[in-house]
Structure formats: structure tokens, C-alpha cells
Image: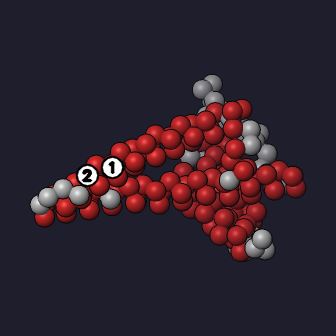
Amino acid sequence: MSTFFSGLFHNKAKIGVLLVTVLLVFYILMVAQRGWLLLTSDGLVTKAMGAAYFVLPAVGVWALVRELLFGVKTEKMARILADEGGLPVDNLPRTPGGRIVREAADAEFPKYQAEVEADPEQWRAWFRLSCAYDAAGDRKRARSSMREAGKLFSASVPAS
């Protein structure tokens, strides 16, 4: 978790993550508090509603922890690739609004796909493929590829 806090106040994305995390924790605590009040009240229906209130905070905590760990692992992989000089070069043309030109991203995509097909057990290739998907605007496949990179990365790093 220390990698998340390094440079926190110099990174807008990290500030946003911190803000959303604080708000979600506050929301979870409020829902859990209401659930506890209902659970300790009289009446079977009220107790059932109180118990049901704990489902949402449990799902929220699970999702929050999962996403934070995903972010920390992604940042760690990116730092390793940056140190090795293995990050994809961001030289794609952009629109006046700053978005990557989709056709240019689509043209670059096959080389990253071929890299994964050549060595599907290499987390670095999956990471670069994820970046290519993201540049092409396919966020769902980008996250899926990054999760695959994370699994392979975890399997390749010795436990400490």
C-alpha cells in the first residue's frame, strides 16, 4: 500500500481515488450503522431488514479492497516496466481535445496482440496489450488484460 501513497498529492488520479475511497467508507459506515439499529430493534421484519443492510456494505468493502489492490499491483507493474524501458511509447496522434485518434491506436494494436500470442505466459506482454486496448477505447478488454497481467505477475514474483 505504500506505493499508493508515494506522490499522492502530486497525482490527480490518486487524489480522486482517495476522495472516492473516503466517501465510500463513510457511506458503508452509515449503512452499517443503520443496519445495526434495525438489527437491534424489536420485530422479526425489522431484524431481517437490518441483516439485509449488512449485505451492501460487505459487497462495498469487497469491491473497494479488490480495486485498490488492482491499482497498487498495476502501479507496481508499470514501475517495473518503466525501469526496464518496456512501457509502450505514447506517440499516437491525438485529437484537439487530447483523445488518442482511434484509427492510429487500432493500427498499433496487432503488434501487441502478436506479442501476447507469441508468449501468453508473459505478464509484460499482457500489460502492453492492456495499454493498447485502452488506447483503442476498449476499457473492458483493457481491464481484463490487466487482470491477466496481474495474475501472471503475482505468479512470477516470489512471495516475501
Query: Residue reaching furthest right?
Result: 84
Crowding at mark 1 (Cα within 10 Å: few <14, some 14-19, many 20+):
some
Viewer-proximal residue among 136 and 126? 126
Element type at mark 2 = helix
The residue shown at (32%, 59%) is 54
Task: In the rendered view, tell whether residue 121 sits above or below residue 49.
Answer: below
Q: Is residue 5 visible?
A: yes
**Residue 8, image quadrant:** top right
**Mark 1 = which residue?**
33
Q: Are marks 1 and 2 in contact (CB under 8 Å)?
A: yes
Crowding at mark 2 (Cα within 10 Å: few <14, some 14-19, many 20+):
few
Q: Position of residue 88 (x, y in %)?
A: 77, 50
Q: Is residue 141 visible?
A: no
> Image check: 43 left or right of 58?
left
> Image check: 87 left or right of 47?
right
**Residue 143, image quadrant:** bottom right
> Image check: 135 left or right of 53?
right
Tell me the number on the disc at residue 37: 2
Type of amino acid under label 2:
Leu
